[in-house]
Amino acid sequence: MLDYQKLYANHLPAAGPLYLCLDCETEADARANRCPACKGAIDVLYPLDHARIGAFDTDPNPLRRYRDLLPVTSEEHLTWLGEGNSPCTSVAPLARLLGVRSVHIKDESRNPTKSTKDRIASATLSRFKGIGVREFVMASTGNSSTAYANAMRLAPGFRLHIFVGQQFAYRLSYADHPQITTHTVAGSFVGTGDTAMDWARDNGIFWEGGFFNYARREGLKMSYIEAYQQMPAAPSHVFQAISSGMGLLGGYKGAVELNHLGLMENLPAFVGVQQESCAPMISAWDAGRATIAREDIIDNPDGLAHAILRGDPTNTYPYMRAMAANTGGALVAARMDDVRMAKGLLNSLGFEACYAASACLAGAMRMAQEGSLAPDSDLLIVLTGAERPLVPNPSKFTAH
């Protein structure tokens, strides 16, 4: 399951993007988020033999720079919202701390809403323009919804319905807007998503798809491609804190595509990090399970990093497991004390990392402590965002 090298070897398109199920390899329509045959995730393969991408400094618009690796068939559909081009900095003190050759920090907190999720909004609205979607429903713990809400200010003609669990409503950082309706739901993030999907179906409105919206993964992929171009050599390991894991999956796919284009010699090992208090994927990984079992699920998840409090990753764990296994990577639980320490270290070095982003470094710290990183390792650590300043939250909620 999920080997992008084999998928491209078996299905490299001659012209135009090919939409394919990652599980059963059934072809799908561009409007599909999940496979009509097996409900697996749909992804996009590109005619790489004809693809060209610009160097990092050739165009300020990453959507144009990497258009040949994006699911956009027309230039007029590109909807750039000002994100991207975030710094990727070599941090010698962290390399010494971890006992490795180098550590590069890709700082996604520099995006407009201080989160890598801004890339999701740009890629998704570009996709939606192409398939004729102007109204959609999505669920979020705060970062994605804030990014999409910011997009509504900049991209007229769309209508957005945001569903959020009551426990995460405080993380919404946008004011009321005529293009946005905000719905609150009692219960977990997973339960909120189920409610949102049901409401979208009952009202005949397009479901944005979350992890299964391939444009999300393709948008996040651009942060990794930027980092691969910014670093002096390919990383040996890539770390990111994960909830569903869609960003890391995009990074894996981007590495395979650059490798095919001759722009990246070796594939890194990809490492997904969760906080120890809510680590269902690591529970299944450590037990050698191919799927999430009941004993892995956290019914009432809690922890410092609220953005990654997903207690039931049943639908997405198999993709993370395959990614880690195929690349010689791992799924790692960050100790809570290390998460606190990592946040302090990053802040002292000038990075505005939130707890979720700090968990990423804490995972690398744990691997270093356990002797899993060789002295000649070159690490890429993706900081997914920062704590946002308090801004007016939406005042009008529709309860469910």
Image (tube, rainbow, N blue to C red):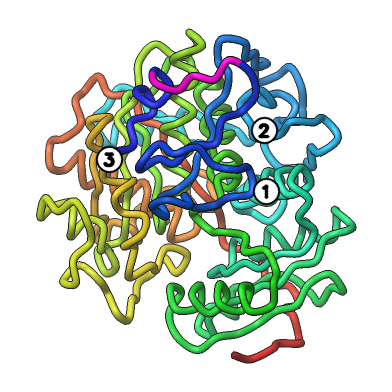
Whether residue 385 is visible here, answered yes or no, is yes
Q: Residue 175's spot in the image, x, y percent?
A: 79, 74
Residue 344, visible in the rendered structure: no
Instruction: Write down the residue under mark 2.
Output: 85
Which residue matches tag 1?
Answer: 124
Q: Within the magenta stretch, is there residue 114?
A: no
Whether residue 348 sits left or right of residue 284 in the image: it is: right
Residue of label 3: 322
Q: CA distance from mark 3 to mark 1?
A: 25 Å
Left or right relative to 180: residue 47 = left
Residue at screen point 61% across, 28% down: 17
x then y, percent, for residue 283: 18, 60
Q: How many marks?
A: 3
Residue mark closest to the camera, 3 vs 2: 3
Residue 354 disc label? none
Q: Quadrant of residue 83?
A: top right
Gap in Å between the C-alphas at discs 3 and 2? 29 Å
The amino acid pointed to by label 2 is Asn
SS of the residue under disc 1: helix
Q: Earlier in the sequence, mark 3 or mark 2?
A: 2
Is 13 covered by the magenta stretch?
Answer: yes
Q: What's drawn in magenta, residue-wise?
A: 10-14
Helix, strand or loop at label 2? It is loop
Which residue is drawn at the image coordinates 45% and 23% (left, top)?
Answer: 11
Q: Residue at x 40, y 58 (%)?
A: 243
Does dot 3 land on a helix, a strand or a loop?
helix
Which residue type carries mark 1? Thr
